[in-house]
Structures are given as structure tokens and as C-alpha cells.
Image (cartoon, helix red, strand yellow):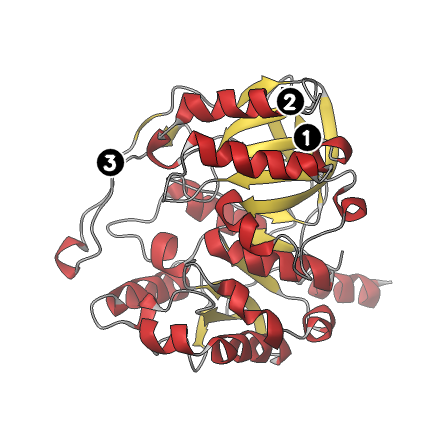
């Protein structure tokens, strides 16, 4: 997989709305300004907002070709070093006819988002570049009150630094608060409570290495059967990343989704599974039982599974790079990045000059 350059201060990052267009709606655009301020002042980045990103939910819904154009233009712009998604949604899949995978491959750069952005991450996989399952503009960068330190640290350590051998630790705190998106709530900070679980290994043991592939399981039914859904061969030796959305799908739905993966033979060829913390811990115990039940149905009772990862729709979330080697110690419940998911071209040039 091709790696993008790591971020540096003063780099340009593009904001795109690839699914839901609420970032530009009159009653929500304040989230954009909160996020823009944080990106510029806390991270030292220059924000470039793509032409269609703030045209509002109605326009964005009606014009998937415009969303895709923003994405393609952002990739082709040599001055842009990263692309951050506004938010998820439910129809990023409609971008498929307008995607040029060669453009993505020839212009690798940091691409980040989660939820329905799962669709776009599979596009990145098809194009052969690494991508980053992590914070969005409206939710994390536009967080009311203060941005979670756990999330902020993940951005700084994974996107701005060589993070080879970096340990992705479990957050000691989490929040189940929901703060309505209204301007009068701008100064409200979500309350954090102690996480009583940490990473949980719900079956299997040992150390596994491989590349992460996956995302929000709710989105999988829209992708399966399309040009971006990986073949069984492409799933071989991967570590499957799964998490659930704010819709909090029932255990029965998760059962059906997992049985589909089992029927495709995916469980037979992957090395393990890691699963995000359910939002607000809804169905926390029930989901664990579903995973054990379905994997047993497919004779995969020894396939290692780790649970309660701070990713996706949890609060707070970190960043998981897709397409670079990671190591998961299911016995000691630890996750490490075996290689940096980014490259430092400036460092390479400096070394050449010294030589």
C-alpha cells in the first residue's frame, strides 16, 4: 500500500462533504467554524474548504457528482496534504460512478473520516493507498467545549509524527453524553467517566500482525457486491475492523451482517477482529455474545477477537490506520503500529543531502 506524507504545521488540509451535507446548513455551520479554528490554531494547519462542501444538505444530497468532484480535485491539488471528511451520512456509495482510482493512487495523501466514510476507505483500499479511520470535522474537530485530549493526542501522534512501534492505548475515560447541536450549547463540555473495561479479548489469544481493513459494519450491506468490496483473496491475512453506528443496530442485525461475512468465507482467511466500543455502550454485553455465537457457527471459536476499541462512534475516539502493518497482542490486550502509516519526504531529502 502507498503511504501519504505525514502532516506538518502550515500544511493545507481540505474539507469535503462526501455523504451528508449538514456542515453547510444554516443551523449547523457554526460547527464548521469551531473545527476550522481548532485545525488552524491547535494544529497549525491551513484549512481549504472544497467548493461544494458548505452548500448544504439538500444540494449535497442531489449532487453526488459534485461531492466526488471535490474529492478528486482535492487529491489532484499538489498543495493539499490531507483530506478530512465533514461527517458520515448514508449515501457516500452514490459517489462510485465518479471516482478515478488512478488519481487517488497517483496523489496519495492523508484521508480521514469514519461511519459512512467507510465507503470511501474501501475506495482508498482499491486505489492502493493507506487511509485513516478517525475524527470528522463536525463531530470531533467541531466538538463543543473542548476537544477530547485522547483524540487530540491521536491526531498529533499519528498524523504529524513517525509513529513506528507506537502503542494505541485504550482511553481510561469515556463519555455517554449527547449534547444537541445548537449554538447555545457551544460551551458545554461532555462529562467523562472511568472506563471499567479497557480492551477486552472475548475469544482467542496470542500475537497477530497484519493490515487493518474494515469500518462501520452498518455500511457493509451497501458495499458488498460493488467494485470496492474486496475479494476473498484481498481479505486474506487482514485484521478485520468493525464498529457500529449511532443507530445502535440490534444484536439481531449484527448477527445477520456477521453471518454474511461468514458465508463469504472471510472469517476463514482473516487473522483476527477488533471491534469498536458501542456508542453509549448500548448492547455492550449483547454484542459480545453475538460475536461468539456467529463465529462458533462458522467453526471459528479460536479466531482472536478484541473488543471495546476507542474508534468510530465512541467518545472519545482515536485513529486507526488502514493498510499498514499493526500488531495486536490478544493475550496482553495491546495494539501497536509496526510501521508508520505515513512517510516523511522532508526527512528523506535531508538524509540524501547529508550523504
| Quadrant in which the N terminus is drawn | bottom right
Whether pointer 3 and pointer 2 mark residues with C-beta atoms closer than 8 Å, the reply is no
Residue receiving disc 3:
191
Q: Residues within 10 Å of mark 2 (few under 14, many from 20)?
A: few
Mark 1 to mark 2: distance in Å?
Answer: 16 Å
Please give the name of the residue rendered at 64% of the width and 19% of the height, measured from the top-left corner. 296
Task: Tell me if residue 294 can be seen.
Answer: yes
Q: Is residue 62 above or below residue 313?
A: below
Task: Name the N-terminal-most of marks 1 and 2.
Answer: 1
Residue receiving disc 1:
272
Q: Nearer the viewer, mark 3 or mark 2?
A: 2
Please give the name of the residue rendered at 36% of the width and 67% of the height, measured from the top-left corner. 36
Task: Name the N-terminal-most of marks 3 and 2.
Answer: 3
Mark 1 to mark 3: distance in Å?
Answer: 33 Å
**Residue 244 appears at what percent x and percent y?**
46, 40
Residue receiving disc 2:
297
Task: Tell me if residue 11 can be seen.
Answer: no
**Residue 173 appears at what percent x and percent y?**
36, 30
Q: Nearer the viewer, mark 1 or mark 3?
A: 1
**Camera-nearest residue between 272 and 97:** 97
Please give the name of the residue rendered at 60% of the width and 69% of the height, measured from the top-left corner. 96
Q: Nearer the viewer, mark 1 or mark 2?
A: 2
Q: Toward which corner of the image does residue 51 lie, by quadrant?
A: bottom left
**Camera-nearest residue between 179 and 248:** 248
Q: Is residue 255 above or below residue 138?
A: above
Q: Residues within 10 Å of mark 3 (few under 14, many from 20)?
A: few
Q: Toward which corner of the image does residue 4 lie, by quadrant?
A: bottom right
Q: Is residue 349 left or right of residue 294?
A: right
Please give the name of the residue rendered at 48% of the width and 75% of the height, measured from the top-left corner. 64
Q: Is residue 265 left or right of residue 56?
A: right
Amino acid at each position: 500500500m502507498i503511504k501519504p506524507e505525514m502532516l506538518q504545521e502550515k500544511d493545507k488540509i481540505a474539507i469535503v462533504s462526501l455523504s451528508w451535507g449538514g456542515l453547510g446548513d444554516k443551523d449547523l455551520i457554526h460547527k464548521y467554524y469551531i473545527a476550522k479554528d481548532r485545525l488552524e490554531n491547535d494544529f497549525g494547519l491551513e484549512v481549504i474548504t472544497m467548493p461544494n462542501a458548505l452548500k448544504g444538505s439538500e444540494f449535497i444530497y442531489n449532487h453526488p457528482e459534485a461531492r466526488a468532484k471535490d474529492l478528486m480535485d482535492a487529491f489532484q491539488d499538489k498543495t493539499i496534504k490531507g483530506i478530512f471528511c465533514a461527517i458520515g451520512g448514508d449515501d457516500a456509495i452514490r459517489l462510485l460512478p465518479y471516482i478515478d482510482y488512478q488519481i487517488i493512487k497517483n496523489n496519495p495523501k492523508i484521508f480521514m473520516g469514519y461511519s459512512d466514510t467507510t465507503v470511501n476507505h474501501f475506495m482508498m483500499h482499491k486505489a492502493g493507498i493507506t487511509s485513516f479511520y478517525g475524527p470528522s470535522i463536525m463531530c470531533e474537530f467541531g466538538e463543543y467545549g473542548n476537544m477530547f485530549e485522547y483524540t487530540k493526542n491521536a491526531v498529533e501522534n499519528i498524523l504529524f509524527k513517525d509513529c513506528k512501534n507506537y502503542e494505541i492505548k485504550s482511553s481510561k475515560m469515556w463519555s455517554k453524553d449527547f449534547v444537541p447541536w445548537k449554538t447555545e450549547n457551544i460551551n458545554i463540555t461532555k462529562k467523562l467517566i472511568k472506563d471499567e473495561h479497557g480492551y477486552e479479548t472475548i475469544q482467542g489469544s496470542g500475537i497477530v500482525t497484519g493490515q487493518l481493513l474494515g469500518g462501520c459494519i452498518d455500511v457493509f450491506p451497501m458495499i458488498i457486491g460493488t467494485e470496492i468490496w474486496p475479494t476473498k483473496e484481498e481479505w486474506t491475512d487482514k485484521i478485520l475492523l468493525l464498529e457500529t453506528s449511532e443507530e445502535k443496530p440490534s444484536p439481531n442485525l449484527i448477527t445477520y451482517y456477521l453471518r454474511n461475512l461468514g458465508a463469504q468465507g472471510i472469517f476463514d482467511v482473516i487473522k483476527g477482529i477488533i471491534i469498536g466500543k458501542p456508542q453509549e455502550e448500548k448492547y455492550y454485553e449483547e454484542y459480545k455474545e453475538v460475536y461468539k455465537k456467529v463465529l462458533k457457527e462458522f467453526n471459528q471459536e479460536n479466531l482472536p477477537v478484541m473488543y471495546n476499541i476507542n474508534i468510530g462512534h465512541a467518545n472519545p475516539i482515536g485513529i486507526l490506520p488502514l493498510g499498514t502493518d499493526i500488531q495486536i497482542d490478544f493475550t496482553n490486550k495491546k495494539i501497536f503500529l509496526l510501521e508508520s502509516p505515513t512517510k516523511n519526504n522532508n526527512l528523506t531529502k535531508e538524509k540524501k543531502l547529508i550523504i
